[in-house]
Image: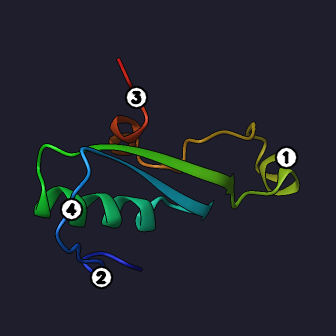
Amino acid sequence: MVGGVYTAGAVQAATIVILDDFATRGSTIEDIARALRTRQPTIELYGVVLAKNERIEWSERLGQPVSNGHIPRRLEDLWDTE
């Protein structure tokens, strides 16, 4: 769990892309975004995750399709440009 672990220094950018390797629950990218917005509330953030930690076999065993349902919907604003 990473809640509240990250802090941000002075930010000289108007836009930042947060890059994460794997998304399990979205905790890392969410906490980095929280730290950056605490330091500079008007910053424009985009979250990019290279992969998600989910196996097709796990999904099939539960009888559910592979989805992003385990990632909190509140993270949608990190990559929603509308």
Disc number placed over residue 11 in the picture, else none: 4
Mark 3 Cα-neighbour bin, 10 Å: few <14, some 14–19, many ≥20: few
Image-based side of 19 in relation to 64, left or right: left
Q: Nearer the viewer, mark 4 or mark 2?
A: 4
Q: Amino acid at mark 4?
A: Val
**In 3D space, how far apart are the residues under numbered discs 3 and 1 (Cα atoms)?**
29 Å
Mark 3 residue element? loop
Mark 1 residue element? helix
Q: Nearer the viewer, mark 4 or mark 3?
A: 4
Name the N-terminal-most of marks 4 and 2: 2
Q: Nearer the viewer, mark 2 or mark 1?
A: 2
Name the N-terminal-most of marks 4 and 3: 4
Name the N-terminal-most of marks 2 and 1: 2
Closer to the camera, 17 or 26? 17
Residue bearing the label numbered 1: 60
Q: Give the residue displayed 18% in from the left and 55% down from the top.
A: 37
Residue bearing the label numbered 2: 5
- The picture quadrant where one finds residue 33 is bottom left
Name the N-terminal-most of marks 3 and 2: 2
Q: Total label count?
A: 4
Name the N-terminal-most of marks 3 and 1: 1
Residue bearing the label numbered 3: 80
Quadrant position of the N terminus in the picture: bottom left
**In 3D space, how far apart are the residues under numbered discs 4 and 3 (Cα atoms)?**
22 Å
Q: Which residue is most to the front?
A: 12
Q: Amino acid at mark 3?
A: Asp
Q: Nearer the viewer, mark 4 or mark 1?
A: 4
Q: Are marks 2 and 1 in contact (CB under 8 Å)?
A: no
Q: Amino acid at mark 2?
A: Val
Q: Are marks 4 and 2 in contact (CB under 8 Å)?
A: no
